[in-house]
Image (tube, rainbow, N blue to C red):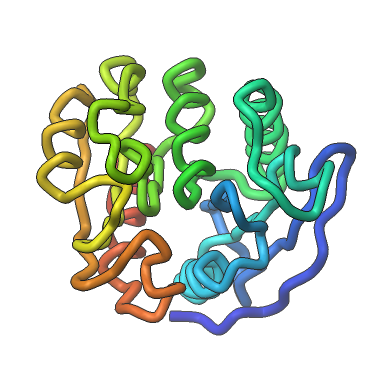
Amino acid sequence: MTATANITPFEEPEIRGFLHRPAQESARGLVLTHGAGSNCNAPLLVAIANQFCAAGITVLRCDLPFRQRRPSGPPSPASAAADRAGLRRATLALQRIVPGPIILGGHSYGGRQSTMLAAEEPAIAAVLLLLSYPLHPPNKPAQLRTQHFPQLRVPAIFVHGTADSFGTLAELSAAVAMIPARTRIIEVAKAGHDLKKGRFDLTPMVDAVAAAAATRE
């Protein structure tokens, strides 16, 4: 693996975050965003961005539009379309920086909006990286957030803790079976929804995403 060259603030109209550039020029890129109660500086995202950058992948770690508007508080359902539009802008911005496939990913709410964007626009990304996908609200397993899964045509890597209150691994496996594209679930033992804030072995995730991206080049 190569060392991280630098991390710099990234700001364009309606895009805010940090760009992780590897020491050598990268052909692949990752847009990475946060959950409903967090921002792009979440320890989980920082750890994952650093690991992907060390593997030679350029990472844009960014705030969703709802977080750009206010420093705290959850998104409202009415802002979901705007958040997806923000993800689309970030992805197009990273496409101008790297020539190869773009991976689109996020934690919890950010991952959910990534899947919904990919269901609407399959060409937006080559691979999805979904960290603690929020299958349903805690203790409400009937309120599934998977209605769009049958429309997903993008390979997806799910990283999920065995103690996640937003969905068990059995529930996730059943839901993922609805996706017609290639999928993989990577279990994180004893992890809750925060995935131990990135303090686990990230190598299998990076390897799985890189392998999936290679098939799209």
Q: In this rendering, would 47 be left or right of 182?
A: right
Residue at image position (63%, 49%) is: 98
**Residue at image point 43% right, 31% down:** 115
- Please name whichever residue, 26 or 12, is drawn nearer the observer in this view of the structure: 12
- Picture residue at 87% right of the left edge, 44% below the top: 12
Where residue 40 sits: x, y (%)?
66, 59
- Asked whether, in this view, residue 92 is left or right of residue 162, the answer is right
Foreground residue, 185 or 5?
185
| Left/right of residue 176 with respect to residue 145 in the rendered view | left
Residue farthest to the bottom? 3
Above/below status of 105 relative to 142: below
Residue nearest the viewer, comparing 141 with 86: 141
Where 136 falls versus 16 (above or below)?
A: above
Give x and y (percent) for residue 24. 60, 72
In this picture, is 21 found above or below 133? Answer: below
Specify the quadrant that holds the N terminus.
bottom left
Residue sticking out furthest to the right: 13
Which residue sits at x=10%, y=45%?
A: 170
Within the image, what quadrant is residue 83 found in? top right
Residue 167 point in image, percent of width and height: 25, 45
Which quadrant, please, contains the C terminus? Answer: top left
Point out residue 216 in the picture as x, y percentages from the top left corner: 36, 37
